[in-house]
Image (cartoon, rainbow, N blue to C red):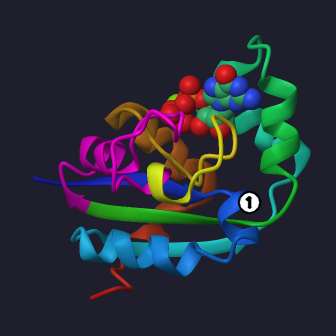
Amino acid sequence: MKEQTLAIIKPDSMEKRCFGEIIQRLLDEKFNILKMKHLKLTREQAEKFYEIHKNKPFFRDLVNFMTSGSVIVIALERENAVNYLREIMGSTDPGKAAPSTIRSRYGSDIQRNAIHGSDSEQNARKELSFFFAQYEIMENISE
Ligand code: GDP
Ligand code: MG
């Protein structure tokens, strides 16, 4: 069954100008791009999106980082999309991520780790609806 998930190319990847390579990697891994938006998160949006982390010591830094530049939010589709994206992203800490994962290749540190991916089907639905209306993710723009 095809599944949908959300990826966010984070500000560090935009700054490093490697977002094109990351998008190509997603295509090479057989993800379909349903919709893609280039935007800058407001402070409110970043705080809401990462609400589950609001009591963590790194929350403030994370919100500062995610609003420090633009991001690309991508609605993706693939078999087993949620878990497969997490697999090719690698661990949160790029230094611990398996070789050839996106974070190992493009991430800098545990915060500036290149990409976000939803961690469950339920969160994928929630996160997709954070950025996209249902009608926007019905068409496959990468086919
Ligand atoms: P993910 O699901 O692998 O992205 O990791 P988490 O959900 O645990 O954390 C969300 C994001 O917060 C990560 O992707 C990092 O950008 C950031 N983050 C996580 N842990 C730390 C930490 O210990 N220190 C800092 N500064 N940032 C962190
Ligand atoms: Mg997470």
Residue 103 sits above or below residue 141 on the image: above
- Spot occupied by residue 8 in the image (x, y as percentages of width and height): 57, 56
Residue at point 33% right, 50% down? 85
Quarter of the C terminus within the rendering: bottom left
Residue at point 80% right, 56% down? 41
Looking at the rendered structure, the kind of residue marked 1 is: Pro
Asked whether the viewer can see residue 27, the reply is yes
Asked whether the viewer can see residue 51, the reply is no
In the image, is the residue at mark 1 within 8 Å of ligand 1 by its beta carbon? no
Residue 23 sits above or below residue 102 on the image: below
Which quadrant of the picture is home to ligand 1? top right
* The one of 48 and 106 positioned closer to us in this rendering: 106
* The one of 42 and 96 positioned closer to us in this rendering: 96
The region drawn magenta spans 78-103
Mark 1 highlights which residue? 11
Residue 121 sits above or below residue 51 on the image: below
Give the structural element (helix, strand or loop) at label 1.
helix
Q: Quadrant of residue 59?
A: top right
Residue at point 36% right, 32% down? 120
Q: Residue furthest left?
A: 1
Q: Would you say residue 91 sits in the magenta stretch?
A: yes
Q: Would you say residue 79 sits in the magenta stretch?
A: yes
- Spot occupied by residue 18 in the image (x, y as percentages of width and height): 59, 74
Count of picture labels: 1
Residue at point 82% right, 45% down? 65
Q: How crowded is mark 1: few (under 14 residues within 10 Å), some or many (20 or more)?
A: many
- Spot occupied by residue 74 in the image (x, y as percentages of width and height): 50, 65
* The one of 133 and 142 positioned closer to us in this rendering: 142
Q: Is residue 36 left or right of residue 108?
A: left
Residue 82 sits above or below residue 26 on the image: above
Q: In which quarter of the image is residue 49?
A: top right
* The one of 99 and 138 positioned closer to us in this rendering: 99
